[in-house]
Image (spheres, helix red, strand yellow):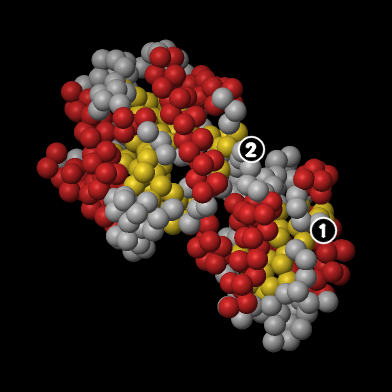
Amino acid sequence: MDIIDQSELQNRVVQLRKYIKNEGLDGIIVYSDEYRSGYCTYFTGYKPINVIEESPQTLIIMENEDPILVIGRLNYYSARETVWIKKVLQHHKFETEISELLKKFNEKGKKIGIAGEHLMPFYLRDILTKAMPDIQFPIVTKIIDDMRKIKSKKEIELMEKAANINDKVLTELKDIIKIGMTEQQVVAHADFLGRQLGADLGSATVVMAGKNTKFPAWRATNKKLEKGELLMVDFNPAIGNYCNDGGITFLMPGASKFKTEALINSHKILKKTINSIRSQTKATSVHDSFYESLKPLKLDSNFTPYVTGTRGTGHGVGLDVVEQPDLNKFSDFIFYPRMTLAIKLDLHELEEQGLRVEQVVEITEQGARPLNKLALKVSDDWAIL
């Protein structure tokens, strides 16, 4: 089945309890929302559907207490029947019955960690501190980030299924895309094909054409595809809540030699870089490989300004399309087996346009095993229409 077994979910909570005890904590409160549900979904196996106010998910784990899941009122009815956690409460009752429940944990000298604090709204922090005014609340998101970085066999299996769907969708899109279509129509085809193959959407499908490709992200419009334009498609299907983040850039007929060669070289360099990744090496090797390959082609200036910030050359992928660790020019972490990462080459200012080629890989003892295989197995000019 395309789900994580209950035993694996329960074992994650067991491991989390060990980590928080080692940190000298008396409990942990984990928060996530529907668009970045991973922090809680990692332990619950439940991904909320957003119906205006229905996205919050809060997991409360106190020492020697059964876990408590607090979730939006409409998701509550399905969660209480499908989630392994027995105590499921409604999020809109945080100020009333949940606050009363939390008061019994208020004791001077105790510490309760908070994970997902960057997603947690201020009103919820206020409720927690009012209910437990004597508690210290250290930020411990890194504990869960570190747990999620290393994937289980089942997690990787689900991610590879999502990657295969991504490859199939992008392959079919190649035969569908035509001059005169709109960005919106390309999104419609991608989403339909992905759902027809059994995938959910890990995040909104990004389609950018022509002048819009100069942006790192873009909400599709009714702009029509024109002759010689670059067309970025960043499609993120999910299976069993586990995501893929594979993207490719098509080149419409009638393109200039400069854009044609830039796209061909991007495929060559992505293949070379992924093949060069080794376990137990620094993540900066991805940036360095890209840069050293682009410099002789005089494309380094089209690359360098975009790799110093978040997700410059890639990022972790799993329950969320984008999760830790972050890959950029300054990433100092080490690649370890069973990490799953999107490796991304972005080039911009290509005749005022840009391109992206992105593929997800699993780090193994031998190197990087591609989960997405499309851009790595096709010819370097495959995406030229």
Above or below, 187 against 227 in this view is below
Q: Residue at x 39, y 19 (%)?
A: 174
Q: Residue at x 58, y 78 (%)?
A: 22
Res 114 quadrant in image: bottom right
Amino acid type at image mark 2: Met
Chain-order first, disc 1 or disc 2: 2
Label 2 neighbour load within 10 Å: few <14, some 14-19, many 20+? few
| Count of residue discs | 2
- Tell me the element at label 2: loop
Whole-percent x, y for residue 224 in the image? 43, 18
Label 1 neighbour load within 10 Å: few <14, some 14-19, many 20+? few
- Name the residue beneath numbered marker 1: 87
> Does residue 9 appear to the left or right of 294 in the view shown?
right
108 or 10, nearer to the observer: 10
Q: Is residue 222 visible?
A: no
Distance between the Cα atoms at labels 1 and 2? Answer: 25 Å
Whole-percent x, y for residue 81 in the image? 82, 46
Whole-percent x, y for residue 238 in the image? 56, 37
- Name the residue beneath numbered marker 2: 1
Q: Is residue 323 visible?
A: yes
> Does residue 6 appear to the left or right of 162 in the view shown?
right
Amino acid type at image mark 1: Lys
Above or below, 171 against 308 in this view is above
